[in-house]
Image (cartoon, rainbow, N blue to C red):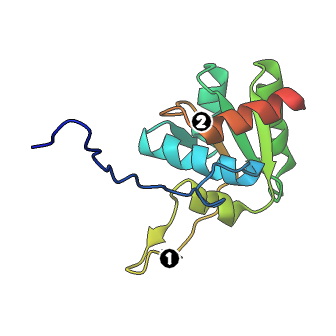
C-alpha cells in the first residue's frame, strides 16, 4: 500500500529505431519484384504470350512487364501495341531468367535457392493483391514518366 506523499517509480523502456528499420526508398526493380511476388500469391499474374495477350485485350491488366532480351520482334510489337491501345503501363526488364524467377517459374531447393529457372518474356499483373509500399513506388514511377 502506498501512503500519501510516496512516489511510485515506473520503468520506461526506450527503443531506438535503427536506419535499417525505417522504411527507405525502394528501387523500381525491388518494387517490381515485390509487386510480382504479391500478385503471384493472390493468383493475379498472367505469364506467357497467350495469357498476356488475352488479359491485355480484355483490359484486365493493371501492369505489363516485358523482357528486353526477347528476340522475336513480332512478340514485342504485339505486347507494346496492346499496352498502348488500352493505356496499360509497360515496364521492361533486361533478363528473362530473372523475370521467370520473380514470377515463380522455377523450382526452389531445400536451401531456398531457385533451380531450373524458366525464362519468361512477358507477364501481366491482373490483381495487385494487397496494397503495399512497392505498389505505390511503381505507380509513382509511372506517373513521373
Q: Residues within 10 Å of mark 2 (few under 14, many from 20)?
A: many
As drawn, the label of residue 124 is: none
Describe residue 116's horizontal placement relative to residue 76 as left or right.
Answer: left
Mark nearer the viewer, 1 or 2: 1
Q: Could you say which quadrant of the image residue 98 lies in?
A: bottom right
Q: Could you tell me if residue 144 is visible in this image?
A: yes
The residue sitting at the bottom extreme is 111
The residue positioned 82% from the left and 59% from the top of the image is 69
Instruction: Name the quadrant of the C terminus.
Output: top right
Q: Is residue 91 above or below residue 18?
A: above
Describe residue 136's horizontal placement relative to residue 130 as left or right.
Answer: right
Describe residue 18's horizontal placement relative to residue 140 as left or right.
Answer: left
Helix, strand or loop status at disc 2? strand
Q: Position of residue 118 (x, y in %)?
A: 58, 65
Q: Residues within 10 Å of mark 1 (few under 14, many from 20)?
A: few
Q: Is residue 61 above or below residue 29?
A: above
Q: Give the residue at mark 2.
A: 125
The residue positioned 58% from the left and 62% from the top of the image is 101
Helix, strand or loop status at disc 1? loop
User: Closer to the camera, 74 or 65?
Assistant: 65
User: Closer to the camera, 121 or 23?
Assistant: 23
Q: Could you tell me if residue 79 is visible in this image?
A: no
User: Closer to the camera, 76 or 15?
Assistant: 15
As drawn, the label of residue 113 is: 1
Amino acid at each position: 500500500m502506498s501512503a500519501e506523499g510516496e512516489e511510485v517509480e515506473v520503468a520506461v523502456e526506450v527503443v531506438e529505431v535503427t536506419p535499417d528499420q525505417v522504411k527507405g526508398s525502394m528501387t523500381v526493380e525491388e518494387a517490381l519484384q515485390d509487386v510480382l511476388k504479391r500478385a503471384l500469391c493472390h493468383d493475379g499474374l498472367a505469364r506467357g504470350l497467350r495469357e498476356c495477350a488475352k488479359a491485355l485485350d480484355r483490359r484486365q491488366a493493371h501492369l505489363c512487364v516485358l523482357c528486353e532480351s526477347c528476340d522475336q520482334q513480332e512478340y514485342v510489337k504485339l505486347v507494346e501495341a496492346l499496352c498502348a491501345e488500352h493505356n496499360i503501363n509497360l515496364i521492361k526488364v533486361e533478363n528473362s531468367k530473372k523475370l521467370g524467377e520473380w514470377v515463380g517459374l522455377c523450382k526452389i531447393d531445400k536451401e531456398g535457392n531457385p533451380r531450373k529457372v524458366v525464362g519468361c518474356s512477358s507477364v501481366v499483373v491482373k490483381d495487385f493483391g494487397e496494397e503495399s509500399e512497392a505498389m505505390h513506388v511503381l505507380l509513382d514511377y509511372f506517373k513521373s514518366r
